[in-house]
């Protein structure tokens, strides 16, 4: 099995996070790098969604991925093997989120080989609370809500939904087996964030992945103009 680079993230100074995040955004803009912060609960299908989406986009834009977890490198290896795009693993040392300085450390590790991506995806730690509380310096925030989690999650975790530009509702292929109301879920999301775009997808069957890929491509294209 191929090895991937593992970056051990050091604890950052949280009080300065907003300033650090704004500075990082300006640096990324100058370099023409669009940073997507992708969040969700564990098991929602982030990595599977990324694999399907990257394989639709990798011939059109340059993509790299940072996988954040408390431990292991399985997701970074999976991305690298399934898509061929550059991928590194970020270990948070037990912390349940990334902030701007942690993200910067990851980007520094990713860019050392003169990599110049158009799009970097940060797959944040699986958690519906902590990642939403810390600005990573990202250009845009997205999250995945999976059908088995329930349509009431926007009511229970308001901050996560309020900070996201896009909500992907994944695993729609199993909707017949769960008490999940798509329209009610969309209403709950809009209650928290009227500006959030919502795209239903199935990472397993591929339904809706083209819509997500097109959203990303349009965002990156507009950003680089």
Image (cartoon, helix red, strand yellow):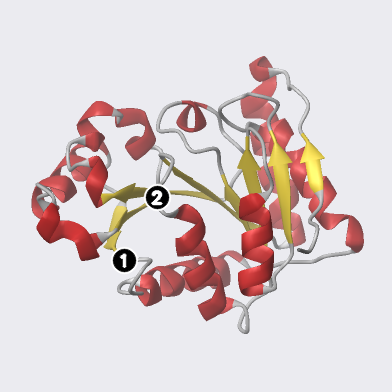
> SS for tag 1?
loop
User: From the viewer's perspective, is residue 80 above or below residue 108?
Assistant: below
Where residue 200 appears, as percent x and y from the top left, is: 26, 62
Q: Which mark is residue 37?
A: none
Residue 175 lies in quadrant: bottom left
> SS for tag 2?
loop
Residue under the point 39% across and 77% down: 210
Relative side of 201 to 118, left or right: left
Relative side of 174 to 19, left or right: left
Q: Earlier in the sequence, mark 1 or mark 2?
A: 2
Where residue 224 appears, as percent x and y from the top left, is: 63, 68
Residue under the point 61% across and 53% down: 75
Q: Which mark is residue 202?
A: 1
Residue 156 lies in quadrant: top left
Where residue 202 appears, as percent x and y from the top left, is: 31, 66
User: From the viewer's perspective, is residue 212 above or below residue 167?
Assistant: below
Q: Outermost residue, bottom direction? A: 59
Residue under the point 71% across and 63% down: 32
Quadrant of the snapshot with the N terminus: bottom right
Q: Outermost residue, top direction? A: 15
Relative side of 64 to 60, left or right: right
User: From the viewer's perspective, is residue 114 above or below residue 136?
Assistant: below
Q: How many neighbours does mark 1 have within 10 angstroms: few (below 14), some (14-19), or many (20 or more)?
A: many
Mark 1 or mark 2: which is in front?
Answer: 1
Residue 76 lies in quadrant: bottom right
Q: Which residue is mark 2?
A: 165
Residue under the point 22% across and 43% down: 189
For the question of whether residue 225 can be seen, the reply is no
């Amino acid at each position: 099995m191929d090895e991937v680079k593992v970056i051990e993230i050091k604890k950052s100074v949280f009080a300065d996070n907003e300033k650090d995040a704004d500075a990082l955004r300006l640096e990324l803009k100058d370099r023409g790098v669009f940073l997507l912060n992708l969040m969700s609960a564990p098991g929602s299908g982030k990595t599977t969604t990324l694999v399907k989406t990257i394989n639709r986009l990798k011939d059109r834009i340059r993509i790299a991925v940072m996988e954040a977890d408390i431990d292991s490198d399985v997701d970074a290896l999976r991305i690298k093997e399934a898509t061929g795009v550059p991928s590194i693993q970020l270990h948070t040392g037990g912390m349940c989120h990334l902030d701007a300085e942690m993200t910067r450390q990851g980007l520094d590790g990713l860019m050392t080989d003169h990599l110049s991506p158009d799009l970097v995806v940060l797959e944040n730690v699986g958690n519906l609370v902590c990642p939403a509380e810390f600005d990573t310096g990202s250009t845009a925030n997205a999250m995945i809500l999976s059908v088995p989690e329930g349509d009431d999650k926007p009511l229970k975790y308001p901050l996560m939904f309020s900070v996201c530009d896009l909500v992907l509702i994944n695993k729609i292929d199993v909707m017949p087996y769960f008490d999940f109301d798509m329209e009610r879920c969309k209403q709950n999301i809009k209650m928290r964030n009227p500006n959030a775009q919502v795209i239903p997808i199935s990472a397993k069957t591929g339904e809706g992945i083209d819509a997500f890929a097109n959203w990303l491509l349009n965002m990156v294209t507009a950003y680089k103009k």
